[in-house]
Amino acid sequence: MSISSSEMLILSKWLQITPSYGYNELKTEISELSAEERMKALRDVYGASEDIVETPEYLRSKLEELDERLNDISDKEACEMASFVCPQYADSPKFRLPFLRAELFDVDKAAKRLVKYWDRKVQLFGTDRAFRAVSVIDFDNDCALALERGGVRILPVRDEAGRQIIMIDRSNWNANLFSTETLMKNVWYWAQLCMEDERTQKAGAIVFIVPSGDFFTATHGQQILGRSINSDMTEALPIRISCIHRFCLNPVVKCLVEHTLIIFEARLRARLRQYDGNAADNEAELQQYGISLDMVPTELGGTLVFDFQSWIKARLNIELERYSLPDGAHTGMEI
């Protein structure tokens, strides 16, 4: 892969202003974690997190605690608006349980995440669309095109621990073609699908990341997007990410790795696994984490064949049936 002189100039300037966060810093950061935090990170990476017995009494108690904690939070305008507009959804156990599960029933953290969820959703979608399902029916042309590009995909398999596998392929999302807002709306769409699945709520998810093959979008544009994804995943969306597996397929991108680690929140950096090459090149290591090649798409060196375009068409039909009224309007309510 050749880089022009003008591209090299942009790259050199970007490297000067972007802090490096190398593996020595990462090693130090992990060593400073408490023994309990290190053990939790290891359990997550290897899919050995402790199971929580969810009896009806336990769930009822935690939901009551969550309600009390929310009452103690004063700055929650978007959350209160959701309770006013769609109380049968926003205040329901079905909606709130994913936030508790994402935080392993830490009520304080779950309350903060729920408030942040509504703040962020109103910011991203506006009050006219924030209080209903994120649906492809509402997508404009840019959002629909970004969705078809397959920058994010929920794979039709789970790892050995039962965790949902999400693939983020930034090479399919050119940050020069799509705005960060457009791409983030796509991320929220996929997050909602995970949020609706009880098994994923309980077991969590792992992520395969393929950095962009283009050096510029792997740096400036993709860092902006990466920070937005990281922020929403760690603070707002009710999804527990147990481990991130990042595959560097491009040698040019590989040289930028130390300058992209900084976009990850500390909790995720401790759960990040980095690979040179594709899955086939790293089969033995992946197996340690409960991942076999038949769980990995062919474009990443695995054997999983996934017809993404057919999946999109089938999903559109489901949503047309689920959300549309006889006159073609949106139901206006989340399920």
Image (cartoon, grey):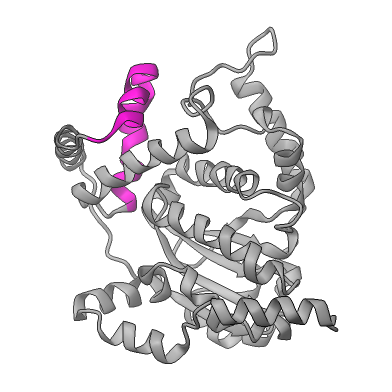
At which x and y percent is residue 230?
47, 60
Which residue is rendered at x = 54% and y = 86% of the image?
Answer: 285
At which x and y percent is residue 66?
20, 39
Q: Is residue 209 above or below residue 129?
A: below
Which residue is rendered at x = 35% and y = 32% of the image?
Answer: 94
Answer whether residue 83 is magenta in the image.
Answer: yes
Q: How many marks?
A: 0
Q: Magenta span: helix, strand or loop, mainly? A: helix
Q: Is residue 82 above or below residue 37?
A: above
Quadrant of the rendering where the N terminus is positioned: bottom right
> Going by the picture, which residue comes out furthest to the top?
327
At which x and y percent is residue 54?
24, 46
Q: Is residue 164 above or below residue 258?
A: above
Answer whether residue 234 is magenta in the image.
Answer: no
From this viewpoint, is residue 229 visible?
Answer: yes
Which residue is rendered at x = 57% and y = 60% of the image?
Answer: 224
Which residue is rendered at x = 21% and y = 52% of the image?
Answer: 106
At which x and y percent is residue 249?
71, 79
Residue range highlighted in magenta: 75-102
Q: Is residue 245 left or right of residue 162?
A: right
Q: Is residue 266 left or right of residue 256?
A: left
From this viewpoint, is residue 163 visible?
Answer: no
* Residue 241, picture quadrant: bottom left
> Going by the picture, which residue comes out furthest to the bottom?
24
Q: Is residue 122 above or below residue 116?
A: above
Q: Nearer the viewer, residue 303 or 234?
A: 234
